[in-house]
């Protein structure tokens, strides 16, 4: 059994999101991301080569997805999950600071 995903959470706002690798295997990466009010910089879009599945464990977040049908806003609260196919452009508009927003993310290759 590994450490607890809620262990060592920050007690004060962070300057940047904290990304902790929980598992790294060929073709699979699992991360815990802790946000304390961070958002994507203006004009910045994530455009990742890997597929991503994200589960919001605690807190809240607001994302914008650039879909073939146009821009779509998604609000996540604890327990919500989202699959982001490879190259699905997206950005984080806002994250809850208190309590910290805790994400569990799983990445795998698009091939």
Image (cartoon, rainbow, N blue to C red):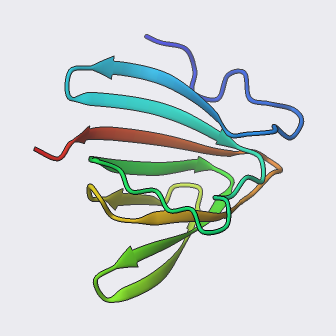
The relative height of residue 89 versus residue 55 in the rendered view (above or below) is below
Question: What is the x, y in percent for residue 111?
Answer: 10, 44
Residue 54 in the figure: left or right of residue 95: left
Residue 22 in the figure: left or right of residue 63: left
- Give 23 or 15, whichever is nearer the viewer: 15
Q: Quadrant of residue 16?
A: top right
The relative height of residue 7 versus residue 57 in the rendered view (above or below) is above
Can you name the residue that lies furthest to the top here? 1
The relative height of residue 7 versus residue 67 in the rendered view (above or below) is above
The total number of labels drawn is 0
Can you name the residue that lies furthest to the right here? 12
Which residue is found at the position 24% from the left and 39% from the top? 108
Residue 76 in the figure: left or right of residue 11: left
Which residue is found at the position 26% from the left and 55% from the top? 86
Q: Quadrant of the N terminus?
A: top left
Can you name the residue that lies furthest to the front here? 43
The relative height of residue 104 versus residue 44 in the rendered view (above or below) is above
Question: What is the x, y in percent for residue 26?
Answer: 20, 21
Which residue is found at the position 28% from the left and 83% from the top? 68
Q: Quadrant of residue 102?
A: top right
Can you name the residue that lies furthest to the left here? 111
């Amino acid at each position: 059994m590994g450490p607890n995903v809620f262990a060592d959470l920050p007690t004060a706002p962070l300057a940047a999101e904290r990304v902790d690798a929980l598992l790294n295997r060929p073709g699979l990466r699992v991360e815990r991301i802790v946000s304390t009010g961070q958002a994507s910089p203006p004009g910045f879009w994530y455009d990742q080569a890997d597929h991503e599945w994200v589960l919001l464990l605690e807190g809240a977040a607001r994302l914008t997805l650039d879909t073939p049908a146009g821009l779509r806003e998604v609000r996540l609260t604890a327990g919500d999950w989202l699959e982001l196919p490879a190259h699905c452009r997206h950005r984080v508009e806002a994250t809850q600071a208190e309590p910290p927003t805790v994400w569990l993310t799983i990445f795998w290759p698009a091939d």
